[in-house]
């Protein structure tokens, strides 16, 4: 009987826990992000409005159209792509949020392999 009660209590507490996500706070603003791929840290700065994201990475400026699927998922489409890889849209999903940052995963649309990163909000829009 004690085992069953313990399992029920454990199930009750574990099933009620969900990561908090306040994604609306991160739809627009100025951000800094870090992504680790193969033990290499990639850093970028970007500014996002409701419809546009302008990113600076390794002194290169890249602009993308922004289309929100819901409050926590967005599709980026590169404006004026120069290479084939830039022609692929990117799907980003916010997984968790804090008051000033969010953890995300992203991939090219239609691809299974996903990468993760963290973005930090620098200023309000």
Image (spheres, rainbow, N blue to C red):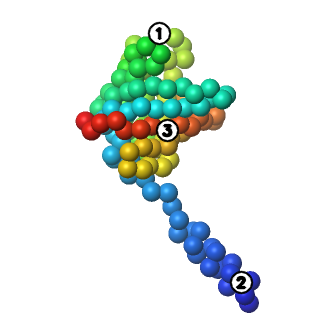
Question: Is residue 110 visible from the viewing direction of this image?
Answer: no
Indicate the position of residue 99 as horizontal and vertical percent values.
38, 50
The mark that comes first in sequence, 3 or 1, is: 1
In the image, is residue 103 above or below residue 115?
below
Q: CA distance from mark 3 to mark 1?
A: 26 Å
Which mark is in front, 3 or 1?
3
Determine which quarter of the picture holds residue 32: top left
Q: Mark 2 — residue?
A: 4
Which mark is in front, 2 or 3?
3
State yes or no: discs 1 and 2 in contact (Cβ < 8 Å).
Answer: no
Question: Is residue 44 visible from the viewing direction of this image?
Answer: yes
Q: Mark 3 — residue?
A: 118
Q: Which mark is residue 82?
A: 1
Q: Secondary structure at mark 3?
A: strand
The mark that comes first in sequence, 1 or 2, is: 2
Indicate the position of residue 47 as horizontal and vertical percent values.
33, 28
Of 28 and 39, nearer the camera is 39
């Amino acid at each position: 009987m004690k085992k069953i009660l313990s399992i029920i209590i454990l199930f009750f507490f574990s099933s009620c826990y969900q990561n908090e996500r306040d994604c609306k706070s991160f739809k627009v603003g100025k951000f800094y992000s870090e992504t680790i791929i193969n033990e290499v840290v990639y850093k970028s700065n970007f500014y996002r409005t409701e419809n546009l994201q302008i990113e600076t990475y390794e002194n290169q400026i890249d602009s993308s159209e922004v289309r929100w699927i819901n409050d926590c998922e967005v599709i980026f489409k590169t404006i004026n792509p120069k290479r084939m890889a830039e022609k692929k849209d990117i799907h980003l999903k916010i997984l968790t949020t804090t008051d000033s940052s969010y953890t995300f995963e992203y991939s090219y649309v239609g691809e299974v392999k996903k990468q993760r990163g963290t973005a930090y909000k620098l200023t309000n829009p």
